[in-house]
Image (spheres, rainbow, N blue to C red):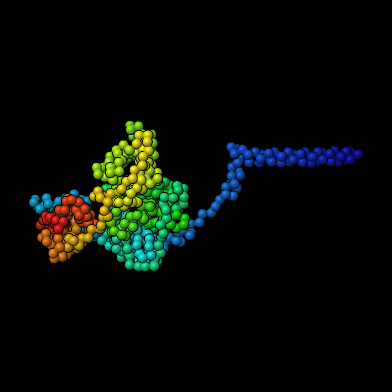
Amino acid sequence: MIAKKLIKKTGNLLLIALISAGVSYFTFAQINNQRAESNNSDTSSYAILTGFAQMVNDQIVETDFTIAAEKTVNAVVHIKTTIAPRATAQQQQRIDPFFDFFFGRPEFFNERQRQQPSGGSGSGVIISTEGYIVTNNHVIENASEITVTLNDKRSYTAELVGQDPSTDLALLKIDADNLSSIVFGNSDIMRVGEWVLAVGNPFNLTSTVTAGIVSAKARNINILSTDMKIESFIQTDAAVNPGNSGGALVNTKGELIGINTAIASQTGNYAGYAFAIPSSIVSKIVADLKEFGTVQRALLGVSIVDITSELAKEKNIKKLNAVYVAQVAPNSAAADAGIKAGDIITAVNNNKVRSVAELQEQVSRYRPGDKINVTVLRGDKERNFSVELKNLQGTTDVVQKVNLGVLGAEFQEVPTEIMQKLRLSNGIQVKSLKSGGKMASAGIKKDFIVVKLNNTNITSVSDIEKAVSEVQNSNEKGLFITGIYPNGQVAYYVINMSE
């Protein structure tokens, strides 16, 4: 009897437990459903983090860089240069050949102090199947020999077609055809946040590809030291290191949208910031160098500054994203068009310019004689001016590359032992003279070392070309030459370039 009662009691307890468990499960399920609905509707809820991965994964689109890499890696070359040795900084401080000529020269050089030829390396981009290659000017500057190695390990000695220190670009040519090349893309339409690839040879590691995004555009980092410099860089976080200079920055289609040029770093290696010359500038400079051998630099003839909050307050300027005209040169393109100091330039050919870098980039695309429309604010009124751009000499003429044949001389690097013996920091030596040429007629002899032309120090043949060009395109036709012979004799000559 007692056993029956225990069994009945136990059965009742088990039934109650089962019913309670069922109720609890149903209640818990209902609560979970309500929480899930709440998570889907209330984005401020912490619980939404549990569903975030699935939501994002549903929208992920795969980015494939392989096509762009395959299109470009064979068109990026490795450049090595041989540079004739120069005197050391300590030697340069003591070098003054004209002082020594009058007061004597201490003999402190010996064979051990003779420097050996040095070299450098970088990258370049093949832009035509006929062997034209664009690179940075600083990669090949002062090089006595330039060697280009293709991705398939073929090597060529390159000819320097032309160079432009103002944009840090140079054009080379190798004797080859049917080469892989990169087509130009439009850097203007690249947006901040777009994927890009940097292709080059960092640390002599050939055919290296890195990826990043466009971090900013129209950056001026004040890295170029030449007059008339143009800096409007594309900033990217694609890894760029020494050796990448002159290499390609391409979009995901494999189109060239920039030439990698510089990094911002305290160590000399990549630190997250790299800069490239946009293809809009590269294409124009390359076209000029290829056609004329020199850049057709178009000028507005204005001194311009970025508008800061301080300047805006001082000048009562209401628009900050524009460029302030501080001065206008007399008889310049801007002056002829009617632009005045105090005007605020807002656009060129309807393209907005928000900084000096953007304005320089826009104008750099044109040649002397081209006409552009410049939009300015004068007071509260917007005005448009048609401006015919001029060259450095104030004309609209095309500037031709200097033919040094008119001098009747060939030049070469000064041998190291002579540089050291004479304690020279710069100079170019006359290798040979043509009878009847201007130099020979002026009395210059073979092996003469040209140190200065019209008070400009001469360090390369391009310096001679520049000095001669300036004389030929000016009203002053006298070329004043200062130099020294290997025996220590200082000499001065004058050549009339108008004859």
For the point 14% across and 56% down, the residue is 496
For the point 21% across and 53% down, the residue is 473
310 relative to 121, above or below: above
331 sits to left or right of 280: left
Q: Position of residue 138 (x, y in %)?
A: 30, 54
For the point 33% across and 49% down, the residue is 371
**Image quarter of residue 377:** top left
Evaluate whether residue 26 shows in this view.
yes
Q: Work out which quarter of the rendered image holds the C terminus and state it.
A: bottom left
Residue situated in front as seen by the camera: 45 or 8: 45
Residue situated in front as seen by the camera: 447 or 298: 298
Q: Position of residue 273 (x, y in %)?
A: 40, 48
**Among all residues in the image, which is located at the extreme right?**
1
**Image quarter of residue 48:** top right
Q: Position of residue 490 (x, y in %)?
A: 11, 55
Task: Give the tally of numbered discs.
Answer: 0
Residue situated in front as seen by the camera: 48 or 233: 233
Q: Position of residue 107 (x, y in %)?
A: 13, 55
305 relative to 87, above or below: above
For the point 15% across and 51% down, the residue is 96
